[in-house]
Amino acid sequence: MADLAASMEKNLTGAKQPREKIKTQSQINKEVKATIEKMEMQEFAKVSHSPKGTSITIDSRYAYGVGNAELKPAILPFLDSLVPIMASRGNKFPIAVEGHTDSDPTFGAIAARYPTNWELSSARAASVVRYLMSQGVQARRLRAVGFADQVPYGTTWAQARRGVSVEAVQAANSTNALKAQNRRVEITFLQNG
């Protein structure tokens, strides 16, 4: 089968294309960490690994305006720097983009556009997905998910799967500093689709 695929690839392109090795989660994690360091994004972007996969947490102060889902121009070079990792033929992991908010309800003009934090968090995730697609990441590899305030910053993968209690959400939003942490977008190279 491999010989047939190589032959077909050679016939279609006129030259045999080198095969890119399939990357592991550990390799993706190292590449993302190196990119964060190269782009000097340590203040605004953190990388972590869990059974869910390799996640990049991006502070919303860098990504969006308050009550807004439009990407700030400052985040675009960082997203651009992630595109080669995402679009690599050796990266076979699905990519989830998750939007998160604090527990404050939307209000005023913001509420007219985003009646609840569910709409706002979903729109934030979708704006990142839309941008990544415009930069060449295949749509079939991406998914946009909004979590509103239901998965506070620091929630483990296992806790998120079980569901976070109302009391835990309230405690995680009890100060302005905690609320600021909760307003974020996470990009995860999923271990399992």
Image (spheres, rainbow, N blue to C red):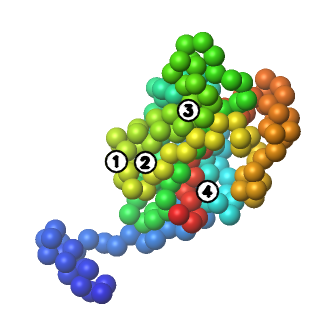
Front residue of 131/40: it is 131
The numbered disc on residue 136 is: 1
Among the two numbered marks 2 and 1 on one chain, the one whose residue lies closer to the N terminus: 2
- Please state which amino acid type lies under the numbered disc 3: Glu
- From the viewer's perspective, is residue 99 above or below residue 18? above
Tell me: 152 left or right of 184. right
Mark 4–mark 1 Cα distance, whole angstroms, equals: 21 Å
| In this rendering, the label closer to the viewer, 4 or 3 | 3
Mark 2–mark 3 Cα distance, whole angstroms, equals: 26 Å
Name the residue rendered at 71%, 41% in the picture. 150
- Please state which amino acid type lies under the numbered disc 1: Gly
Mark 2–mark 1 Cα distance, whole angstroms, equals: 8 Å
Mark 2–mark 4 Cα distance, whole angstroms, equals: 15 Å
* Residue 32 in sight in this render: no
Q: Which residue is mark 2?
A: 83
Dot 4 and dot 3 residues touching (CB under 8 Å): no
Q: Secondary structure at mark 1?
A: loop
| In this rendering, the label closer to the viewer, 2 or 1 | 1
